[in-house]
Image: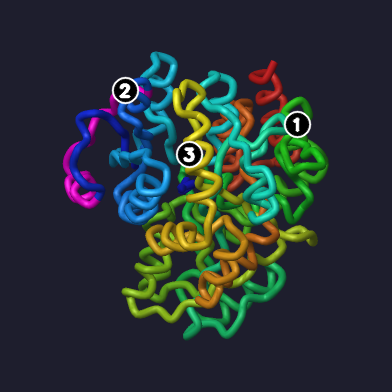
Amino acid sequence: MKVKKKGAVAVGMLVATSILALAGCAGGTTAEPTSSDDAASAGALTVWVDADRARALEDVAKTFEQEKGVKVNLVVKDYGKIRDEFTAQVPTGKGPDITIGGHDWIGAFVKDGIVAPVELGDKTADFEKVAIQAVTYDGKTYGLPYAIENIAILRNTALADSTPGTYDEMIAKGQAAGTEYPFVVGLDPQASDPYHLYPFQTSFGSTVFAQNDDGSYDASQLTIGDEAGQKFAGWLTAQGDTGTKVLNLNLSGDLAKEAFNAGKSPYFLTGPWNVADAQKAGIDVSVDAIPSAGGEAAQPFAGVQTFFLSAKSSNALIANEFLVNYIATPDVQTALFEAGGRPPALTESFEAAQSDPLIAGFAKVGANAVPMPSVPQMGSVWDDWGKTEAALIKGSSDPAGDWVKMADAIKSKLG
């Protein structure tokens, strides 16, 4: 799952080179961070970022130093290692003042006591609603959001002139195109892909946990096994090996991408991370809304890329200042968007980015998205959820019963 899917930079007395130099050497090795205490004594902030974010933040880091007299040292890290390294180092007093990461890490970070709330104040209203919902946990905002990502339908405009509003109509139109596949989505033979199939699930009215008024999740209320979920389970089986065979467990994410880019399907359920390669393959793409399979709105998960503030930072006040008054600005949020290709979280930049029709397409779908649950309990959901979906796609004589068994297994893990 791309949640992205959505690397970082750490600061220290040993970091004396420029941001550009750090970004340039980031591809081979990773600089090790020094402690936040060292950064404080040096009048510096330690920020972990990946190489792309380092380049986007170079100018604002220099501006902050000029205006506040505090150096911002960006140390490039491998994004895939940030979570583990942050979790391991912060409790020991090491690690950065600030790091980037996915909003769905928040629950575990709060539970481990390694992140502090970011005081957004009046700036809260300047962000997209889903971005603020994503970083809100126990009534506090644990992070400064900078990018939003969600999946949508990529359509090959040469093969289909539109994406219908319902799943069945889309499949019929895909079959009429005469391609090998009427529709593709990447799945795993053992674990399916609950992330990519979730918009179809929500179109049946099925969710994982109940949501509070502020958009946060109530982990004490597991809703996935309800009647709506059972109806979705029946639909999964009907679309699988013993039914229409449209949902194909033999098409991994990479194979689904290859099929779409080779013109073998007019429709591909995916995220912005696959747009560039489709265009390189000569596909004229459109980004369209995800059709409903169950009659209600198809709501994908939204992933929000975030700056986190370390709970052990000796520079918490100045770090909060850097985030709220320097990162949360249109120029910086736009620079981060241009570096990563995901719609910005700040509304002014978010709206400006939609001059690109593809970004506008993802943004339109994202307006109906729901934040991926960040509660720690979510870690106990994915395994049973994915394996059950895969089993249903392979075929089941009692889809509803299998779905209830899955929910019971998850409840058992949750205690």
- Where does residue 169 sit, x and y in percent of width and height? 68, 74
Taking the magenta stretch, the answer to whether it contains residue 25 is yes
- Which residues are the magenta region? 20-36
What residue sits 43% from the left and 23% below the top?
A: 87
Residues marked 3 and 2 touching at CB (< 8 Å):
no
Residue labelled with disc 2: 38
Q: Nearer the viewer, residue 312 or 402?
A: 312
Specify the amino acid type for callout 2. Asp
What residue sits 42% from the left and 69% below the top?
A: 260
- Where does residue 361 sit, x and y in percent of width and height? 58, 71
User: Image check: 152 left or right of 138?
Assistant: left
Residues marked 2 and 1 touching at CB (< 8 Å):
no
Residue labelled with disc 1: 218
Specify the amino acid type for callout 3. Gln
What residue sits 50% from the left and 47% below the top?
A: 305
Residue 132: image tag: none
Residue labelled with disc 3: 190
Dot 1: element: strand
Front tag of 2 and 1:
2
- Where does residue 360 sit, x and y in percent of width and height? 57, 72
Q: Nearer the viewer, residue 148 or 278?
A: 148
Q: Is residue 198 above or below residue 256?
A: above
Residues marked 1 and 3 touching at CB (< 8 Å):
no
- Where does residue 302 sit, x and y in percent of width and height? 60, 51
